[in-house]
Amino acid sequence: MSDERVNHKEALLRSLRREHAALAELLGTLTPAQMTIHGVHGKDGSDGGDWTVKDVLSHLTWWEQSVFGWLGLPPAVPRSPIPEGELSDDQANAAIFAGNKDRELAEVLRSFEQSFQRLLSALEETSEEQFNQPRASDPDGTPIWELVPGNTYEHSSDHREAIQAWLSKQSSENEGR
């Protein structure tokens, strides 16, 4: 069983690296101006407004910080506060958007990269035993390694695909002009 646990960790780290590289490649094709154009996400207002790529990166970084708490570590980068109590995902996302929408693009990009690098280090340094334990706040819950994808590479992949779709739409609209 020990080998199986190591394989989960190694697979997770590979997936994290692969998705981050794919998102970084996409971001590398964007200008700073493109990263601050509204309309990438939340156009119907359900997630706090009309998000930019910058807002999406703040959102991804915020959720990624959860992993540090699960591992008993302080956040890698500052995390905007959200209201206490039980929040729906939409409510939490609206609060995250509101807490980060005025940040400078350069700061968001630095936090995004710093968070990812520290996450890799934290997961690499996490023992098999800890990695296979549930969160301290949910002692009978799901092991940490099973929770990490939803707040990291799976989440990032969903938003990367949305950014790509938005870019395709922008290209189509520009070609029609």
Image: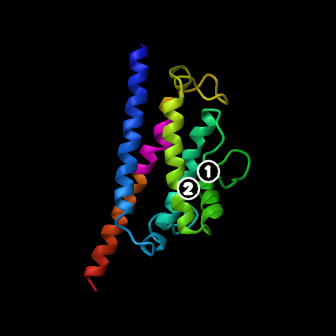
Instruction: Identify residue for label 2.
Output: 111
Looking at the image, can residue 70 be seen? yes
Looking at the image, can residue 60 be seen? no
On the rendered structure, is 51 left or right of 168? right
The picture places residue 41, in percent across and down from the top left corner, at: 47, 63
Is residue 69 covered in magenta? Answer: no
Q: Which mark is residue 44?
A: none
The picture places residue 95, in percent across and down from the top left corner, at: 65, 58
Inter-mark Cα distance, 2 to 1: 6 Å
Q: Residue at x 65, y 61 (%)?
A: 99
Label 1 secondary element: loop
Structural crowding at the residue carrying mark 2, measured as other residues with C-alpha within 10 Å and reported as few (<14), some (14–19) or many (≥20): many
Structural crowding at the residue carrying mark 1, measured as other residues with C-alpha within 10 Å and reported as few (<14), some (14–19) or many (≥20): some
Q: Residue at x 40, y 51 (%)?
A: 158
Up the image or down, 18 lies above or below 91; here it is above
On the rendered structure, is 6 left or right of 91? left
The picture places residue 161, in percent across and down from the top left corner, at: 36, 56
| Main SS, magenta residues | helix
On the rendered structure, is 18 left or right of 151? left
Most extreme residue toward the bottom is 177
Which amino acid is tagged 1? Val
Q: Locate the N terminus and report the quarter of the image it occupies.
A: top left
Quarter residue 85 falls in: top right
Q: Which mark is residue 77?
A: 1
Of mark 2 and mark 1, the one earlier in the sequence is 1
* Numbered range of the magenta stretch: 147-157
Which amino acid is tagged 2? Ser
Are the two marked residues, 2 and 1, in contact with CB atoms closer than 8 angstroms? yes
